[in-house]
Amino acid sequence: MDLFSAAVEDRLASRAPLAARLRPRSLGDIVGQQHLLGEGKPLRVLIESDRLSSVVIWGPAGTGKTSIARLVAGATSKAFETLSAVNAGVKDVREVVDRARERLGQRGQGTILFLDEVHRFNKTQQDALLPHVEEGLLVLIGATTENPYFSLTGPLLSRSTLFRVEQLESSDLVELMQRALSDAVRGLGGEPAAIDDDALVHLADRAEGDGRHTLTCLELAHALAYERAHGSDSGEPSPARITLADAEAALAMRAVRYGNDEHYDIVSAFIKSMRGSDPDAAVLWLARMIEAGEDPRFIARRIVIFASEDVGLADSAALSVATAAAQAVEFVGLPEARINLAHAVTYLALAPKSNSAYMAIGNASEAVRNVALGQIPKHLRDASYRGAQSLGHGVGYQYPHDSAAGWVDQQYLPDEFEGMQFYQPSTHGAERGIVERWRERRMQQ
């Protein structure tokens, strides 16, 4: 039976998905997460010194949470137990606890419990786990894709150290695929394979930072390439070479790419379409950037800048809409955040336009660079400290709130700038009303 079981294990391992076959065997094998696992970084130090206390590893799918836990199992002198919160319950936790007590009593050996998808445990199940974590009988390693501040109870979270893993960068995914292509034992079935550069980049860009998904798609793309290379009965089979078409088929997603030069042209067209109040064109260029794999944070930054540079005081709510979209990119992420970006882009394209704030800071900056700065008028200087009034600071300052109009006629510019006007108001949108009310207040004094 042992020989039979071993044979089953070997065959299962050979048939396992590529992502499982390529699981890291050491901390150095993990791609990305250098903020936690680089030399001297906190999580690596705790693992290598076998001093890990209860932790929650939080981050997107396919970023190495389970791999990190498996490496802890190989590095610790403690017993390592594994449960999945998807199908485990309080009874399973109690059985782990009983074994942990027996180990500790008989051999003085501690126990680590790796609980995958820990957010799936409800409050009752988490409460059942809590006392054993609190007394130190169990060291908990929880893995979750959900925000633990929402999905875990406060007491359990407060007794754990939170480590956040990040989405893998495209360069990390490229490295991961190159390992799969070069590993003759654990890689793509021992079959020689190569990949075109554009296919490699397409897979890396469209996998959304998910290493497992990247390897799954690579394996499928290789299968397509292999069948194409070996499917013909004529002649010797050629080595499988993964093309862009194979990568597109594996991802079920057409590659929409552009070079660095065109990047700037598309961004320019995007901005000018919003400035020209054409929502259809603006959304088209937005979709082009998203489909080409443009960093959504870059798009969001351009939108926030546009809200003040081109809409400005004509509709000050535009800045709130733009910053909310930028926050949604961080909080929600793609693909759903494309809706938030489209919301902001459409709003900005439809909004009235004014660049008066943009022009005002430009005019003021030019004056600061080219005019002697002079002295701050004494009545505007800080008069809050002892002896300030003896220096004349604040003397003669008129408090605007004491005026019925809420405004008093006094000098705010330095003498060298007196009479200069940096802000040139427009009559577009809400700015017209803002300026008219400002002028009315000045007339009331």
Image (cartoon, rainbow, N blue to C red):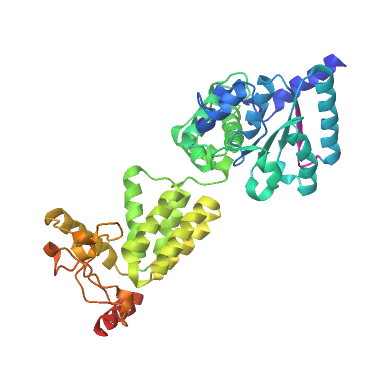
Image spot of residue 346 (x, y percent): 44, 66
Vertical position of residue 74 compared to residue 419: above or below: above
Image spot of residue 305 (x, y percent): 35, 57
21 in the magenta segment = no
Residue under the image location 26 percent in, 74 percent down: 426
Write down the region rendered in magenta: 81-88
Locate residue 361 relative to residue 50 in the image: left or right: left
Image spot of residue 109 (x, y percent): 77, 20
Image spot of residue 371 (x, y percent): 12, 57
Vertical position of residue 12 compared to residue 409: above or below: above
Query: Is residue 235 among the parts visible in the rendering?
Result: no
Locate residue 73 relative to residue 390 in the image: left or right: right
Query: Is residue 336 among the parts visible in the rendering?
Result: yes
Residue 53 position by quadrant: top right
Residue located farthest toward the bottom when viewing the structure as drawn: 444
Residue located farthest toward the right when viewing the structure as drawn: 1
Quarter of the figure with the C terminus: bottom left
Quarter of the figure with the N terminus: top right
Residue 411 position by quadrant: bottom left
The residue closer to the viewer here, 51 or 250, is 51
Residue under the image location 61 percent in, 30 percent down: 231
The residue closer to the viewer here, 247 or 364, is 364
82 in the magenta segment = yes
Residue 165 position by quadrant: top right
Vertical position of residue 208 compared to residue 41: above or below: below
